Amino acid sequence: MKKLKIILEMIKFEHTVFALPFAFLGAVLGSLLLEGNWPTISEWIWITLAMVGARSAAMTLNRIIDSKIDKANPRTADRAIPAGLVSRAETGLFLVLSFVLLFVSAFQLNMLAVYLLPVAVFFLVFYSYTKRFTWLCHVFLGITIGLGPLGGWVGATGTLTWEAFVLFLAVALWTAGFDVIYATQDADYDKEVKLYSIPSVFGIPKALLFARGFHILSLTAMIVLFFITPLSWIYLAGVLIVAGIMIYEHSLVSPHDLSKVNVAFFTMNGIISLTMLAFTIGDLLI
């Protein structure tokens, strides 16, 4: 149990809150649009377990793949694997169990969820390697997290529609934006060891402009979703609140002051995902 606690802290298990609300949003919106009813209790449970398994697998794999990089980086040298708090074998066992949870959950939902598992697994594995050869690594992370709402949609409906892909774009671009902000902390180190990121390649001032651009596009996709679905002014009010939170998030960081990056990254983005879920479900209920 002590080792498990260390691993859960290592992968920031509590940050599942970033992606899980959007998976629920995809499930609810897809069910009501296509079937006229809410997801079943069984679908809620298995979608939740699938998301927990997917994110746990992705973060665990990322920590294993990057363990040598983390050990050499002063900011991350105290993470569990480089610090010797858990072994790679113990972490590997947790990784296998996470993938098993994802696979079992997909089989309990529907066959389209099963057929799409290879796509999900590919991005869960691939994105951890992207910073070794492209500054678009943030976009690949966005795609990976964006699979959450697509997974929720598929899990509840067994189908995919273009509305689901608009939701996917909104989440993918939102994720890419906040990941760029987070990566500003390692801009100098990444440049020194030839790791690719938008901050290390273009510099921090331009990186923050990239982040703003990603978030503007994300908000645009959220607004498009308002026009192509039966969602009403309540959902739109939620989008406006999210826009305000994003503006505040960007006000917390500047090229000359990155001291509040963790507040911008963790706190604000958790609030954004929960706000979108609350206002969307509130809209659909009312």
Image: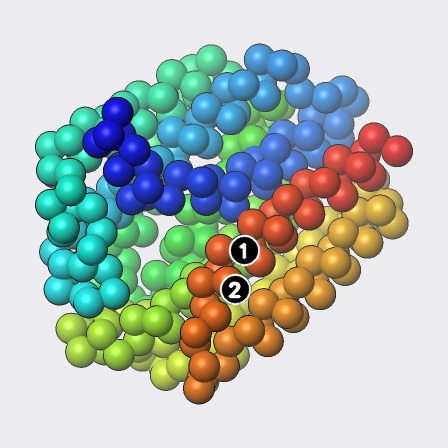
Q: Where is residue 184 in the image (x, y as percent from the top left)?
A: 38, 73
* Element at label 2: helix
Q: Mark 1 points at which residue?
A: 267
Q: How is the image coloured?
A: rainbow
Numbered disc total? 2
- Find disc 2 in the rendering and name its residue: 264
Q: What is the three-letter code of the residue carrying label 2? A: Ala
Amino acid type of the residue tagged 1 in the rendering: Thr
Q: Is residue 265 left or right of residue 204?
A: right
Asked where in the image residue 55 lies, by quadrant, the reply is: top left
Q: Tell me the quadrant of the picture where the N terminus can be found.
A: top left
Res. 95 visible in picture? yes
Q: Which of 52 and 216 is in front in this view?
A: 52
- Above or below, 59 against 215 in this view is above
- Determine the residue positioned at 31% across, 75% down: 187
Left or right of 248? Residue 233 is right
| Vertical comparison of 50 with 171: above or below | above
Residues under labels 1 and 2: Cα distance?
6 Å
Horizontally, residue 79 falls left or right of residue 247, namely: left
Q: Quadrant of residue 217?
A: bottom right
Image point (36%, 82%), residue name = 202
Q: Residue at 61% x, 60% y: name it.
A: 218
Instruction: Locate the C terminus and report the quarter of the image it occupies.
Output: top right
The spot of residue 133 in percent (x, y) is 23, 65
